Image: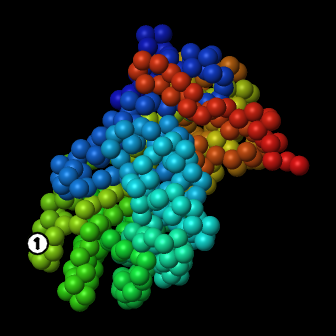
Amino acid sequence: MICENLSVSKDGILFFGGADTTEMIKKYGSPLYLMDEVRIRHNCRIYVDSMKKYFGENAMPLLASKANSFKQIYRIANEEGMGTDVVSSGELYTAKCAGFPLEKAYFHSNNKTDADISYGIDCGIGYFVADNEEEICVIDRIAKEKGIIQKILIRLTPGIDPHTYEAVATGKVDSKFGSAIITGEAERVFNIALSKENIDLCGFHCHVGSQVFDSDVYIAAAETMLSFVADMKNKYGFITKELNLGGGYGVRYTENDPVIDIPANIKLVSETLNEICKKLGIDLPAIRMEPGRSIVADAGLTLYTAGSVKRIPEYKNYVSVDGGMPDNPRYALYKSEYTVVCANKMNENCDFLCSVVGRCCESGDILQENIYLPSSVERGDIIAVLTTGAYNYSMASNYNRIPRLPIIMVDGKRDYVAVKRETFEDIVRNDI
Ligand code: LLP
């Protein structure tokens, strides 16, 4: 199994976080997202413990809200000693409603509106991660109006290609995010920030990409960032308090994805960073990372019920389920791979080549193509798509006016509703 919180009973039922997946469907209806609180906590602890151990007590991982944002996730992340990053007022509002201490929150986005900035300040957000000059000026202006000094980091682009898919390669010079070091823009923006009375510049941020397995990427990015930190110290006497290295490590969607030892990688990165700092004659700033996927992905799966099974001899077979691209658009968007199983027939041979498709009126509504399920797969079987805890609920839509799925949480002792299933009334709530 791709994750250790999955197991199979003698009679071939898939268990997740100790819960019988078929019982969850009976109790809460179909389809649903199932999340494992114990696994979320385990994943948080890996980052919290190893970052503090290797980067020092002032290091802190931030939960990247975009991977999955709902109230309970902030409660869990806070209890585990994480901060959070938000990229919109909606994510910020969710964290606030959950009682998350917002002094540990960082407001990202390449285009914060005046309203976002104003709302962030009113909420007492810890930091804005300012994307560019214009934003720094607006933060300064609104902070002045509200009579406060606002802490910020500046987002820089270190120009590293993470060798992942282009859509998430955000650390390159031609990115819509941040200010490039190599073009001199970073230094210019830095000077603007320093000149602003209502801005307290605390440090710098970069993010090189998502689903990254290789520490070389972090090391290369950190090396460029630390050289910049040293330059700003040498030229302007500026002491960088915080360095944020962006998103976390990759996860295993299928058996083909590598198993990654995160503490060992963080140790490696910390050793290299300490060496670089020594060479450059600077202190290591307080390190932040913003893992999203590796906190929540394998702590979630989606359970569907199979409907029509269509066999087109010599062409293709389809297993249709009662969800699809509205609850998981990642195959449609990125051709993302997933492991798909028949949760009530785990002991049967998987020799039926098929595509698992959703219920939307669109041929691109595919969850996974060319996978193997038991040949007995039929209407009423429970189909599980594994590792869907990240970028599924957070990217879900109501396409075809399909209500969004509930999130059911299990914690080893009990199961509870963390997010209710949407109703048809919810669907028309804003219609006049
Ligand atoms: N910090 C920043 C500034 C980011 O842009 C991201 C991801 C993260 C942190 C979290 O990275 P993670 O630890 O999750 O790899 N929708 C795409 C993913 C887009 C990620 C963009 N930024 C997907 O479904 O794969």
* Residue 90 x, y percent position in the rendering: 60, 54
Badge 1: how crowded within 10 Å, few (<14), some, or many (20+)? few
Tell me what residue is drawn at x 65 percent, y 35 percent.
405
Q: With 241 as the anchor, is 300 left or right in this view?
A: right
* Residue 212 x, y percent position in the rendering: 37, 56
Q: Secondary structure at mark 1?
A: helix
Residue 297 at least partly seen = no
Q: With 46 as the anchor, is 120 left or right in this view?
A: right
| Res 328 quadrant in image | top right
Residue furthest top as drawn: 11
Identified by mark 1, the residue type is: Lys
- The residue that disc 1 covers is 278
Residue furthest front as drawn: 147
Q: With 236 as the anchor, is 24 left or right in this view?
A: right
Tell me what residue is drawn at x 35 percent, y 29 percent.
4
Residue furthest right as drawn: 432
